Image: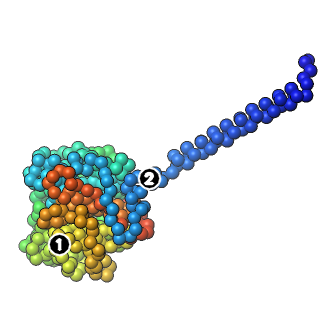
Amino acid sequence: MTRREPCERWTSLRSAGARARGRATSLLMGGALVLWLGLALLAPAESWATSLSDLAASMSPGTWKELTTSNINPVLTNTGGESNVMTGYTEYIKWDPATRRLLFVGADHNQVGGERFVSYTDSTNSWQILPQPPGMGAFSHGYDHGALDPVNRFFYFRYPYLGRTFYRYQMDTGVWTQVATNNIIEYEQCCGGLDYFPEMNGVIWAQGGETPCCGGVFLLDNATGQWRRIGSINTYALPGYSTFAEYNPVHKVVVFGGGQGAGARKLFKVTAAGQVVALGDAPANLGTLASVFTVDPVSGDYLVLTNSKQFYRYDVVADTWTLLPDPPAGVWGTQNPFVFGMVAGPISTYGVVAVGVCRDSSGSNCHLYIYKHSTGTPSPPPTAPVGLQLR
């Protein structure tokens, strides 16, 4: 065996030690990488920031900011109709917390091709035109005819303009189906209010002018798949059309009312027990083209933008109204009615409210504003009742 000098042996030992340390470092780095990837895969979706989440997080209570988004003008304009915007004659837009999308169906006057189904996607910060619902294509604006059930994964739309039929879109499969026809209603008006009411396990339809004096309230019951009347006929003084309905995720009620004529300032609420309760009159006319009525998902305050360019907070528990500071001028349309082209809805994921507006017919003046009313944690999304079988 060849005899090594002491310096050769020391060099060999030092090299071996370096190789061992290199292997250990590689193992540590590899383990850290595996751990990081595992945590990334297990992390909830909300840990990944988006333009919308960053904007919402940067805002203080009582403030407005515009969110610059992609493709908003091509999607919401170029209708071939009279106003060149598809957000006229409406007031709603609905948020799906699972897919992080805003969904809306609407149409201009004499819009080419009829209704347009659109979405805003949080992850891409962009707007898209979705396939038109089958069987649609005749004249029908959006009004307040949209509802979203995040539990059973359905987006609902009432169609046509004057009828008793309703459709729903399965948000995970992209399939539209017609649901039961509302044959209980005495007389169908063009424009009413639709919203999902999880505590009643169904979808509420509130319509003025069911009879000459009054409006009616109905529930599409998930347990039976059929419509039934809520409350009484000839009782709720809403003689005109263009009513609205808005669910409150904090106080677990649906507020409805407004419309044309004598009932324009009348309000009612439906409780989780199915009782209909009269509320005090509003300080301004309500309903499509008179106001946009939405809700803060954190506090449960209703937020109302009116055609007189006023912004109100409505406390449904105390039944009181408070005038809030003016929104930015860009929130309003450029011509009377100033809420024309405006849609709004709560974004529960980030505790804010989205207000979209196309301000004129130019095809290049649509915007998405975000309003933060309060701080805190929004109410958790609803869960399906135990033993529920959807029909």
* The C terminus sits in image quarter: bottom left
**Element type at mark 1:** loop
At horizontal 38% and vertical 49% (from top left) the residue drawn is 123
From the viewer's perspective, is 45 left or right of 304?
Answer: right
Residue closer to the observer: 198 or 16: 16
Q: Which residue is mark 1?
A: 308
Q: Which residue is mark 2?
A: 49
**Element type at mark 2:** loop
Q: Indicate the position of residue 260 as horizontal and vertical percent values.
A: 11, 71
At horizontal 11% and vertical 61% (from top left) the residue drawn is 190
Q: Residue furthest front?
A: 7
Circle 1: residue type: Ser
Pointer 1 and pointer 2: residues touching (CB < 8 Å)?
no
At horizontal 16% and vertical 57% (from top left) the residue drawn is 360
Circle 2: residue type: Ala
C-alpha span from label 1 to label 2: 37 Å
At horizontal 37% and vertical 62% (from top left) the residue drawn is 348
Mark 1 or 2, nearer chain start = 2
From the viewer's perspective, is 348 left or right of 191?
Answer: right
**Relative to 325, residue 168 above or below:** above
* Classed neighbour count for the residue bearing mark 2: other residues with Cα under 10 Å, few (<14), some (14–19), many (≥20): few
Residue closer to the observer: 203 or 124: 124
Residue closer to the observer: 155 or 335: 335
- Determine if residue 389 is in view: no
Q: Quadrant of residue 152?
A: bottom left
Q: Indicate the position of residue 106 as horizontal and vertical percent values.
A: 18, 54
**Relative to 122, residue 92 above or below:** below
Residue closer to the observer: 157 or 367: 367
**Relative to 3, residue 131 above or below:** below
Q: Indicate the position of residue 65 as horizontal and vertical percent values.
A: 33, 62
Q: Residue furthest top?
A: 1
Q: Indicate the position of residue 256 as horizontal and vertical percent values.
A: 22, 71
